[in-house]
Image (cartoon, helix red, strand yellow):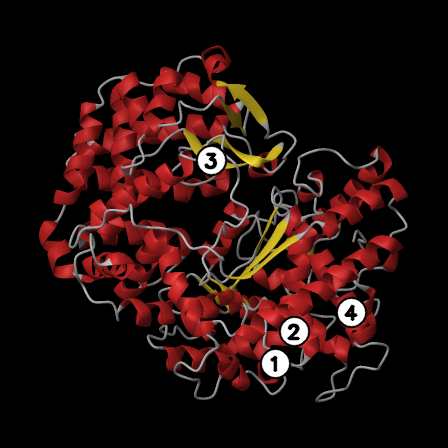
Amino acid sequence: MKKTLLTAATLLALGLAAQANAHESHACADEACTLQALYGGSGDSGAGIATAATSFGTWGFDTAGMDTSVAPGTDFFAYASGTWAKNTGIPADMSSYGAFRALRDLSEVRVRALVEGYALGDPATGGDTARIAAVYQGFMDEATIEKLGAAPLQPVLERVREADSHLALARLMAARDTFNTTLFGLSVADDQRDPDHYTLYMSQSGLGLGDREMYLRENFAPQRERYVAYIAQLLELAGWNDPKANAEAVMAFETKVAEAHWTRAESRDRDRTYNPVPFERFDAYAPGFPWAEYFKAAGVDQGRLAVVRQSTAVPKMAKIFAGTDVATLQAWQAFHAVDGAAPLLSSRFANAHFEFRDKFMSGQLEQRERWKRAVALVEGSLGEAVGREYVKLYFPADSKAKMDELVSNVKAAMGARLDTLEWMSPATKAEAHAKLKGFGLKIGHPETWRDYSGLRIANGDVVGNVLRSKQFEWDYRRARLGKEVDKGEWGMTPQTVNAYYNSVKNEIVFPAAILQPPFFDPKADPAVNYGGIGGVIGHEIIHGFDDQGRKSDGAGVLRDWWTAEDAAKFEAQAAKLGAQYEAFEFPQLPGLHINGRTAMGENIGDLGGLTIALEAYRRSLGGKPAPVIDGFTGEQRLFLGWAQVWRTLWRDDALRQQLVNGTHSPGHIRAFAPLRNIDAWYDAFGIKEGDPLYIAPEDRVRIW
């Protein structure tokens, strides 16, 4: 298939071809500054998201950020956001920047204002605010952390030294009150074949570089070389014997594990990743590992089985574990313990972690300010306790009402699209309609909040607080094994700038923090809202019908409800879409492309989501013509609204990480790639044959 080169305008926007032209800026430290950076003008200092939105253009779109010297059919990202990209620098403490990150900045500023208002008291009697204050202020006490040095790490390392056998190391791998790693990750979640109950899942793990490709592909040799040096550096900081030789041994061990791992694309296949194995069968299924002791140490031995996700990888990794000497396994655990704890320790540990993990691997120029890291620590430990207060201040009631209306309209549009699909048989359509009808919806925040009263937090004990939080969370999860699913539970906090679809609950979820410009503005032009949050709503709905979400029915049960003919037609169109995305080239990163199979669900979500958002917008007009605003038609504004939410700038190293480790296509690609398959986009902007983004009608992908 023809390769699609990104234009010079887009390369400039990405910070790839001319990154030096984009100034390095520092992130804002207060809400007024953050809002000014996000919306322009003076911003507001706490009036809530509706007031903040008034300065984002005049009708919800930043026309000043466009570059109209670029034709829409040449580079739609540059047309919609080229001037913004040229005038916006990636903050020095970030590896990428865009609409999502800007809203995350705003959320951080607001959370900071909340938590810094909490007085330090006795966490045992002062409730959640005292717990939050202890976690936040403990991390902010840099002088004490510096004075302690490596002392908080020593008990963790002593546990590694005491684990002087394969059995003891297996038990250590199962522990949650530690920073160690494991080959076999355990989690408790809704059972895909019995959605009313929780079950235990097991997934491949154990790689410090994240993905098997980093160990096996030739073009990642620099990353591997630097990783070995980093392992040796941390082992030396920890006082571990012979750090250089042990670093080489750890790398050799992880490389063997990487060879056993499934690819990310393989690990997405829900048919292949549901493999229940009774506990009593594990010794025969994957010999060489003390399974009974592992499950007991993890506290899940009251269960009956584990659903193994990568079925052929687990036996191979058990064999690798059995064939690896104890000294190497101890060094592997020691390194991961230091790596996990380093951000919480003195500067020599924290700086080493930053230099490799953030600067070298992702291109981030500066360490994030301490208060931002402290906010992240609080949210990781007591996220819903913060969220409970956040929504009182920053989630207006009318936002939920208008979101309910938008979701209803987009859902109705999806139903209408189902009726018109020529490639789908009546039998499959009936099942699809039943699934759509059963979609649940959660907006803003949970109805019932998490109870953190059992979490022991202590003033001044940063490392201990994190370890106890990890254990508290695991105890909360594992206690649910075999019990009925909590249908009201949320997978994100209200202050998270994101949204998701849960296939087992068959629901879409929109936290409060994403329900603000540029995604959603109650005062904006409806077309922009349909292109922004409407496209996101559609995207999440389509996740229920993407290449993996389509495998669950309306009750959330993993089963095949498709006719064989319909499934074949779907897969053929999905393959065409994957090929389109794989054709994009990144000249600064030769040999790297979007993995069409890994990103398939997200790419289908974008195409289908925007398609039904457009349908919903048309239906919302009630047969009346859309107004023309500033010379833009309604459909033009919708497509511009979509492009605006995917404004993204990248550093080269961060983009490399996204292409290798991410399941989403890079944001700047998402701004225009799905539009190339939507006929209305061609009509709206006069895109013609010969334009770089043009795709012939017969080659356009049409799924939902």
Q: Is residue 215 above or below residue 590?
A: above
Crowding at dot 3, Cα within 10 Å, few <14 / some 14-19 / many 20+, comes out as: many
Crowding at dot 4, Cα within 10 Å, few <14 / some 14-19 / many 20+, comes out as: some
> Which numbered disc, 1 or 4, marks the residue that appears first in the sequence?
1
Residue 632 coordinates in the image, percent (x, y): 74, 83
User: What's the residue type where badge 3 is placed?
Assistant: Val
- Distance from disc 1 to disc 4, alpha carbons, whole Å, reads 20 Å
At a point 18% along the width and 63% down the height, the residue shown is: 120
Q: Nearer the viewer, residue 154 or 617?
A: 617
> Which numbered disc, 3 or 1, marks the residue that appears first in the sequence?
1
User: What residue would you read off at disc 3?
Assistant: 188
User: What residue would you read off at disc 1?
Assistant: 60
Residue 680 coordinates in the image, percent (x, y): 81, 69
On residue 681, the disc is 4
Q: Is residue 699 left or right of residue 529?
A: right
At a point 60% along the width and 78% down the height, the residue shown is: 522
User: What's the residue type where badge 2 is placed?
Assistant: Asn
Give yes or no for contact between labels 1 and 4 (Cβ–Cβ under 8 Å).
no
- Distance from disc 3 to disc 2, alpha carbons, whole Å, reads 36 Å
> Which numbered disc, 3 or 4, marks the residue that appears first in the sequence?
3
At a point 86% along the width and 77% down the height, the residue shown is: 623
Q: Is residue 242 left or right of residue 427?
A: left
Crowding at dot 1, Cα within 10 Å, few <14 / some 14-19 / many 20+, comes out as: many
User: What's the residue type where badge 4 is placed?
Assistant: Trp
